[in-house]
Image (tube, rainbow, N blue to C red):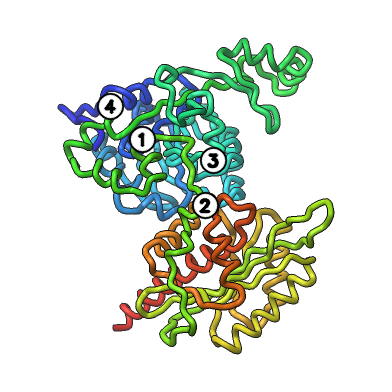
Amino acid sequence: MAWAVVANTIRPQPGPQERFLSSPADITIYGGAAGGGKTYGLLMDPLRYVRNPAFGAVTFRRLSTQITSEGGLWDTSRTLYPLLAARPSSQPRHHWKFPSGAKMSFAHLQYDADVLGWQGAQIPYIGWDELTHFSEYQFFYMLSRNRSVSGIRPCMRATCNPDADSWVARLLAWWIDQTTGFPIPERSGVLRFFSRLGDRMIWGSSKAEVIARIGAPRLDAMTRELGVAADDLVKSITFIPSKLSDNPALLVKDPTYGANLMALPRVERERLLDGNWKVRRAAGMIFPRNAVNIIDALPSDVLAWVRRWDLAASKPTEEAPDPDWTAGVLMGRRENGRSVVADCTTLRDIATQVRTTLLTTARQDKARHRNVTIVVPQDPGQAGKAQAQSLVTLLAGFKVKIERESGHKLVRAEPFSAQWQAGNVDVLAGPWTDAFLTEMDGFPSAAHDDIPDAAAGAFNELAGSITALERARALAS
């Protein structure tokens, strides 16, 4: 709970939440720790416009399941929007319609290409829940959709938790002490101005400063081409940090939440409790070598097998002596819920040899384990799609699945890391085992992450397939 509702009036809590709702910036980013009332703030901010029948807002999550997950955006909105007589609907996507006709929707952008589905859209208010989960491309593309014919000034609002390796950390660098990693208190809510030229950001403390830095020749060309005034080429942005201590309503409602954050591992605790933007996971923290169980023979209770590949197609050369590896991890899920890593195949070679290795390995896996799902990644773009389809054709006769990769590698690794650290992973002893454990232990600081990426992908695929199998069994019983 993050809002006081008195006599049908919903108010933000004093402090960061109130400053977030009163921000005049074109783009306002709010948060930087857990429990600061970010979601309520994001849902409440656009309600000031719902008496305008032409108003529309869209709030994005990276995955569709995150919208409707327990206590997520949809659940939280159900505690707020009915107070203003809004009616819910889940078709064509989850949204609320207000008596005036104004609409507030929730949508997901899992892949970069998903933004193309919003071509031609005019969205006065765009919200981002957990901005670090999205790509920089998605954010700035949707900024082009942030326009309005409703008479309401377009704006973007976002929430986030710290991630030292994200593009958001670079975007917010001015507001963050680069030595300690903590927000600079006196800069909270202070507006900065920028213009984005290609991949370059031109910053200033005022619109005039940015315009001066663009330079007269380029500025004249841009204003003539776009038919706008120079001021319209500059956007304002600010960051308002908040922490659990800024949300007394939550502390009253759930006084044990702080203890939950204190119980997190060090990196997550410093990010989510303290709001540190510089702390990183070091080698040995995510997949510690000594946390797994080495076994001499494969167990007989494996329910499903997955071989997940991380692909590359380069040989070492004088110019590039240490290219990425092609890595294929074979993993099984046991009846007792444990995971077993049975093989890790790696090579650095040209595409033809990589294709030969994939086919040979598929034949060997089928002979040894019969039913093995082969997962191959699909890179963004048409070239990635063509490559993936070509591999499916190559592996005709085998069970093959194409997976479009999304999200940060560290995020994708979290489910497997949790099981690894809990001691729920068995690794078969073999000539490949030492190299496998070395690269896993070095993630994410090591020069290569091909093996961890393949292993995490195999685990995630197995988790999904076993869940589906369990649901099928439950329905049959």
Residue type beneath disc 4: Pro
Among numbered discs 3 and 1, the one appearing first in the sequence: 3
Tell us which disc is closer to us: 1 or 2: 2
The 10 Å Cα crowd at callout 2, few under 14, some 14 to 19, many 20 or more, is some
Tell us which disc is closer to us: 1 or 4: 1
Q: Quadrant of the N terminus?
A: top left
* In the image, residue 293 above or below residue 122: below
Residue 250 visible? The answer is yes
Among numbered discs 3 and 4, the one appearing first in the sequence: 4
* In the image, residue 128 above or below residue 351: above
Residue that numbered label 4 is attached to: 12
Distance from disc 2 to disc 4, alpha carbons, whole Å, reads: 41 Å
- The x and y percentages for residue 14 are 27, 22
- Cβ–Cβ below 8 Å for labels 3 and 2? no
Disc assigned to residue 283: 2
Residue 99 visible? The answer is no
Distance from disc 3 to disc 2, alpha carbons, whole Å, reads: 18 Å
Residue type beneath disc 1: Asp
Among numbered discs 1 and 2, the one appearing first in the sequence: 1
Tell us which disc is closer to us: 3 or 1: 1
Residue that numbered label 1 is attached to: 274
Tell us which disc is closer to us: 3 or 2: 2
The 10 Å Cα crowd at callout 4, few under 14, some 14 to 19, many 20 or more, is many
The 10 Å Cα crowd at callout 3, few under 14, some 14 to 19, many 20 or more, is some
Distance from disc 1 to disc 4, alpha carbons, whole Å, reads: 22 Å
